[in-house]
Amino acid sequence: MRRGGELRVLEGLNLSISYAEFVGIIGPSGCGKSTLMRIMAGLLKPKSGEVIFRGKPLKGPTPRISLMFQTPALFPWYTVLENVMLALIHERGLTKRDKEEKAMAFLDMVGLSGFETAYPAELSGGMRQRVALARALVSQPDLLLMDEPFSNLDPLTAISLRREIETLWLNQSLPPSSIVMVSHDVEELVEMAERIIVLTDRPARIAGIIEVKLERPRQRRSSEFYDYVDRVYTLLS
């Protein structure tokens, strides 16, 4: 809201995410990308329209959709293991020991075995983001939403975490089935996404959609890679 009137952030957006798809979203700063992610996660209700998830209207948050924020939203008074177990709080069919074992398995998956009893303040930024990733994955969601997950990490840590997430997604025996990632880094999206949705300034509309048809692992130094980068920048401008 602004001065008693509505501030329209998104308008006329019609998106579909397919099973086992990796979609990237980019747009000008402040255009509503984070708002869109929260709507997709069921955390915000749109003024008009609706979100359909697995054939039914999305009424609110669900364990089948996980959201990773730009800054890891960890509880400082909980250990690493306890932070991950929070995502299993509604799993009534699991004992406490079951939840501990499942959380430890996902911590091991993201390279944090041995840090279960540590507290967030004792970890580096990259390690805290790995804890957030383990928590996002432990409920084994169908859809993982990531809101600029690498923007606060140093370059080497970001590269490592990008590779791990891509490996998890490519291994379809592991969650999640589909990923939607918001980023301000064009090269990052061309490297990871199958489809890139470019948004306009606020109120955000779709400026264009680019399908990235490059073999994996994608080579940033190739001319084909930068052809896609140029296409995204053209839509952004």
Image (cartoon, rainbow, N blue to C red):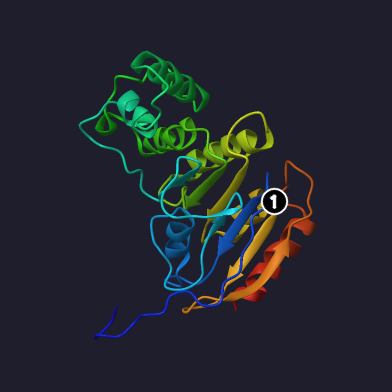
User: Could you tell me residue 104's position as x and y percent?
Assistant: 43, 19
Q: Quadrant of the C terminus?
A: bottom right
| Residue toward you, 51 or 41 | 51
Q: Quadrant of the N terminus?
A: bottom left
Residue extending furthest toward the front: 56
Which residue is at 60% across, 57% downward?
A: 24
Asked which secondary structure carries label 1, the reply is loop
- The local crowd at label 1, few if under 14, some if 14 to 19, many if 20 or more residues have their Cα within 10 Å, is some
Which residue is at 51% across, 75% downward?
A: 204
Which residue is at 51% across, 70% downward?
A: 49
Q: Which residue is mark 1?
A: 220
When asked about the image quadrant of residue 30, the answer is bottom left
User: Could you tell me residue 10's position as x and y percent?
Assistant: 48, 74
Q: Is residue 135 above or below residue 19?
A: above
Left or right of 98? Residue 143 is right
Residue extending furthest toward the left: 77
| Residue toward you, 34 or 38 | 38
Three-letter residue code for mark 1? Arg
